[in-house]
Image (spheres, rainbow, N blue to C red):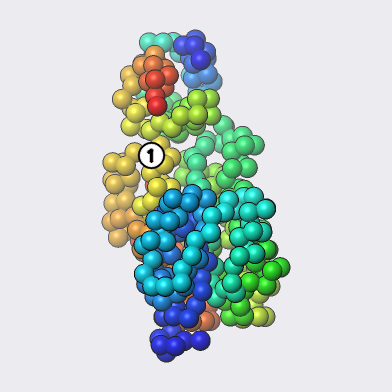
Amino acid sequence: MQASGDPFSLCGKTVLVTGASSGIGRQAAVSCAERGAVVIVTARREEALRQTLGALPGEGHQFICADLTRSDEREALVGRLPALDGIVHCAGVSTRMPCKLITEEHIRQVMDLNFTAQVLLQTALLKQKRLKSAASVVFLASRAMEYPSPGNAIYSASKGALAAYAKCLGLELAGRGIRVNCIRPGMVWTDLILGQGLDETELREAQLKYPLKRFGTPADVANLIVYLLSDASAWMTGSSIDLSGGGEGILV
Amino acid sequence: MTLEEFITAFADLLDETDPAEINAGTYFQELDEWSSLSNLSVIAFVKTEYGKSITVKEIRACETIEDLYNFVENAG
């Protein structure tokens, strides 16, 4: 599989990245392409997706617009995909809502994209046989699944649910050599953390509580994604990896 | 939403403060129970009721409940 003989290379691999219109998803697509993968990017917003596509070095990449919370769009997406060596599930939302104010709609909004859509996309990929043997599946969970911060209850729950699902998926697919791993980032500088009413000045102060004195960058996470997609991590499955600048137990 | 309705809704976001103490001129950030969670409650309330996104910084810039009401009503 490795034309270059370098186990850290993604040359010869085809990778699907969801949530690729911004943040960690966009950077994951760029980093995979830089390491030689052919990347298929998907998200809802076409204009932003085109920008991601334009940022990818190399040939053969494509974008497919899809709202992953809709079953018809999921099926259409999967129907257009080639056989995959890797999948990176980056689609996700975060809205802070104190427990006293949680509504059914809030739960639905967060769980639909952060959990249900990813699970059902994975189901469709398996049913339509789009995963090659020895493929690698990566989910983006969060430190939030174990460490509380105010207003984060449903987001934390969605990430905990996703990580639990991923472990079962990994077990079921291990017989085919398909690996499934989770990344649990601490705070990462993306629109996701800036879009919930939190003040950037305060976040800049908060990041100093992390032992490495900063929140993560999308590239910090994307580098681990590349590793998990590569043959260098061939013995890793069912893992849930903390990536948080040493900020164990700290979110904000 | 009228100012009166806003005040009633605001008082409802709080748990320890007597609603009778809450009026247009209340300096809400000086209330004993005011906390970072209160800011999140206001942000969530404004998002749900007005469909508008406001920030902690913008809430801090308001002094009285009437200031906050006027800010929210006119927010983009």
User: How many numbered discs sit on the rendered protein?
Assistant: 1
On the picture, is B40 further left or further right than A212?
right
Residue at 59% from the left image edge and 35% from the top image edge: A102
Q: Residues within 10 Å of mark 1 (few under 14, many from 20)?
A: some
The chain letter for the residue carrying disc 1 is A
The residue wearing badge 1 is A198
Against A126, residue A8 (above or below) is below
- Look at the image and tell me whether residue A80 can be seen: yes
Q: Quadrant of residue B37?
A: top left
* Furthest residue in direction right, as rendered: A127
Q: Quadrant of residue A246?
A: bottom left
Residue A127 horizontal/vertical position (percent): 71, 68
Residue A183 horizontal/vertical position (percent): 49, 64
On the picture, is A118 further left or further right than A228?
right
Question: Which residue is more in the foreground, A250 or A33?
Answer: A33
Residue at 49% from the left image edge and 61% from the top image edge: A63
Residue A214 horizontal/vertical position (percent): 30, 55
Residue at 64% from the left image edge and 77% from the top image edge: A174
Against B67, residue A89 (above or below) is below
Name the amino acid type tagged 1. Leu
Residue at 38% from the left image edge and 61% from the top image edge: A54
Q: Secondary structure at mark 1?
A: loop
Question: Which residue is more in the foreground, B41 or A12?
Answer: A12
Against B35, residue A51 (above or below) is below
- Look at the image and tell me whether residue A248 can be seen: no
Against A38, residue A160 (above or below) is above
Residue A157 horizontal/vertical position (percent): 58, 49
